[in-house]
Image: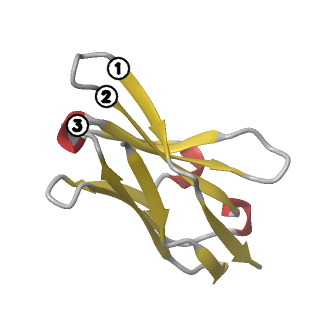
Amino acid sequence: QVQLVESGGGLVQAGGSLRLSCAASGIIFSAYGMAWYRQAPGKQRELVASITRSSSTSYTDSVKGRFTISRDNVKNTVYLQMNSLKPEDTAVYYCNGWGPDIIGRIMDYWGKGTLVTVSS
């Protein structure tokens, strides 16, 4: 059974920092690309950052220079370090993983999300 479990969300003041974690189980983590998405109230879900299995990273423009995605293939965990947080970063943050199952099909998995609230 595949699980992606996010943690680390919470309430923080503008300018503060949070680190989100996503622990994966049931997949060959090192073979998976991982990403963080977010969905603010009344808005569509958007891609925030991604990291490939070779650790190449990409970011949406609004978080470049403030957020850092990383992965630990020993702990089967992907992280999102968020610095200089702004009220507009308030959203539910979701972990996503994509990669092969045991017979080679490309699968796409989601966590249940963790809420980040940034107060002004």
Q: Name which quarter of the figure residue 98 lies in.
A: top left
- Of tags 3 and 1, which is closer to the observer? 1
Q: Which residue is mark 1?
A: 106
Dots 2, 1 in contact, CB < 8 A: yes
Measure the C-alpha gap from mark 2 to mark 1.
5 Å
| Residue to which mark 3 is pinned | 53
Quadrant assignment, res 30: top left
Could you say where residue 24 lies in the image, as x and y percent from the top left? 33, 52
Left or right, 69 with reference to 89: left
- Report the front residue among 71 and 67: 71
Could you say where residue 99 lies in the image, as x and y percent from the top left?
31, 28
Earlier-in-chain disc, 2 versus 3: 3
Instruction: Calculate the distance from the C-alpha at mark 3 to the C-alpha at mark 1.
Output: 14 Å
Q: Position of residue 74 (x, y in %)?
A: 14, 58
Q: Residues within 10 Å of mark 1 (few under 14, many from 20)?
A: few
- From the viewer's perspective, is 26 left or right of 18? left
Q: In the rendered view, would you say 32 is above or below 117?
A: above
For badge 1, the amino acid type reads Ile
